Amino acid sequence: MPMKSFPRPSDLPVPAGAEGWEKIYPYYLVFQDELKDIEDEKFWFCDSQHWPTAFKPFETIGGEFAVKCLGQYNARHLMIPNANGIDFRVHLGYLYMSPIPVPEEQIEARLPEFQARIGHYFANWDTMLDQWRTKVRGTIDELESLRFDPLPEIVPMDDIVSGKAMDGSEVLMENYDRLIQLCYQNWQYHFEFLNLGYIAYLDFFNYCKEIFPDIPDQSIATMVQGVDMELFKPDDELKELAALAVELGLQSRFDNTDNAAEVLDAIAAAKGGTRWLARWEEAQDPWFNFTTGNGFYAHDVYWREELSIPLGFIADYIRRLDDGQQIMRPTEALIAEKDRIVGEYQDLLDSEQREVFDAKRQLAATAYPYVENHNFYIEHWTMGVFWRKVRELARTLVHHGVFAEEGDLLYLNRNEVRDVLFDLVTSWGVGAPQGPIAPAYWPPVLEERKAIVTALKTARPQPALNTPPESITEPFTRMLWGITTEQVQSWLSADDEDSSGLKGMAASPGVVEGTARVIMDASQIHEVEQDEILVAPITAPSWGPIFGKLKATVTDIGGMMSHAAIVCREYALPAVTGTGNASTKIRTGQRLRVDGTRGTVEILDVEETLPEVSGPGAHSHAHAPVGG
């Protein structure tokens, strides 16, 4: 029986209005007709976990840097024996990936290099991780220092006297180049420890499967849980601020948090307000460099720039505290459960096996927190500063009449932006009265590109392309994205299955029943109500403030080491990830039974006719609003 296949790239219909979409992205990001035979042979999966909405041309930078740098650590730094990097393309506006295997005959030769390289890291883990934080913080500080000031009317007299012999336009161009390079630099740093975190966990995972053939994947994950992660720190700061507000009797000041300035003024005028505001200021650096999105899009909104967001989360925590709820993560219970399971498996081993088991588990537990912590430093903090600097540059270009509005810059790719800068500094430098050529050239191009991106966003991406391999073995594809042989076959069989159920990854244990809340993007998370079951294409780490309200989580994509899976285990919430289509199959208001131990989701009232859900449609790809 021939294996079922997903559509080929050329089989997918182009959404109306998006014709010619390929030309808005760099040539190397789109499938080429001349390579069709080769590219149709490869299996590609859509990474809607990180890129859930269609790219504007400038935004491909996050996908390009992230996936390229992930690959370099597999293929060039660490020489992972069975995994090179991941090839990637943009198709119809969405990012598709194809793991690159290592030829069988090369695997053994890579082993000594691999062992020497990871051995050095694991032997010097704390020292090198401290160096990593210093490197990353240095990059962020340099990003913060970049300026994109408008060009002066004339060169200052001081520059004449000093013999500087430059007009200042070189600063604009150098800072743009440096902006791109610094972003690229921190994405290289991003994967230095992330790949090691996966390797340590996978080494422990594979050893457990070897000595305990029937051990559930979740039991292995439980043996490294209950850790203090920096990624939880922004949310923990909000919880502490909520508790302090209750202690000081400031609850009424949080009744309406839509206008942050008014809320903060009201707190300042209240008894105890000065003390609360001091704690509020302390929490912001660096923990408010946090977005409700994932950092990959220019429209992601950051707490430090929209203070009503953290104030709204604090107000919700205050209400829950006043209701007598426990808002802290159940860390002690998680650690007790970890210790219980570790002890039970240790008791099954002889002394030699136990020594190996303990060493591998300790290494995995040491490396495990970084799998989440890097998110704060790179996706949130670095990218928050990066997008802020992009907006500063855009404002200067608007000031000089290059663009009509700040958001226009995002419809150029990064190399086109450099051309625009040279256009500007040339016309300015020679005193051309008509100014740069850009206003004559770009408006019709921008109009066309904006229409194309808008059209691309109307269609959800196909979860995968072409024929899947008989076996998917690449470890990162399995653990992070949940792209396993079984899951891919489940996606292909979705139309044949009972309409009342879905199968996914058993990501966090427990069985609950409750009401579904379908959330398609971060702008909707305020809609989540107490004790609902969150259903989403994927969750972002920054959705932490709502996890304490949930009964369970169900996602379309994600593996055992996805953010959704890790966060749910740390909140002791049942979770099923990698279902493929839960967010389009389930409707808000439906009753669900989520079995995070078996990886199943049952729709209990599938026959009911439910009212239309307001907001982004269940069958269209919702997206956050476009912004500069």
Image: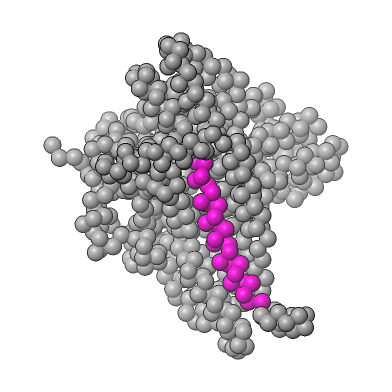
Q: Vertical placement of 179 versus 161: above or below? A: above
Residue displayed at 63% across by 41% down: 130
| Residue at the far left in the pictured view | 1
User: For the magenta stretch, what is the residue range?
Assistant: 167-194
- Magenta part, dominant SS: helix
Tell me if I can see residue 591 in this picture.
Answer: no
Q: Considering only vertical position in the picture, is 309 above or below 203?
A: below
Q: Percent from the top left, x then y, of residue 311?
A: 69, 42
Q: Quadrant of the N terminus?
A: top left
Residue 187 sits inside the magenta stretch: yes
Residue 149 horizontal/vertical position (percent): 67, 70
Position in image of residue 129 (x %, y %): 59, 40
Q: Residue at the location (44% across, 15% down)?
A: 352
Say left or right for 422 vs 462: right
Q: Nearer the viewer, residue 247 or 211?
A: 211
Camera sees residue 385: yes
Q: Is residue 608 magenta?
A: no
Instruction: Identify which residue is drawn at 48% across, 69% down.
Output: 415
Q: Nearer the viewer, residue 145 or 431?
A: 145
Picture quadrant where residue 575 is located = top left
Q: Nearer the viewer, residue 16 or 354?
A: 354
Task: List x then y, in percent, for residue 226.
Answer: 57, 25
Q: How many labels sit on residues?
A: 0
Residue at (73, 30) in percent of width and height: 243
The image shows residue 252, relative to residue 215, as above or below, that is: below
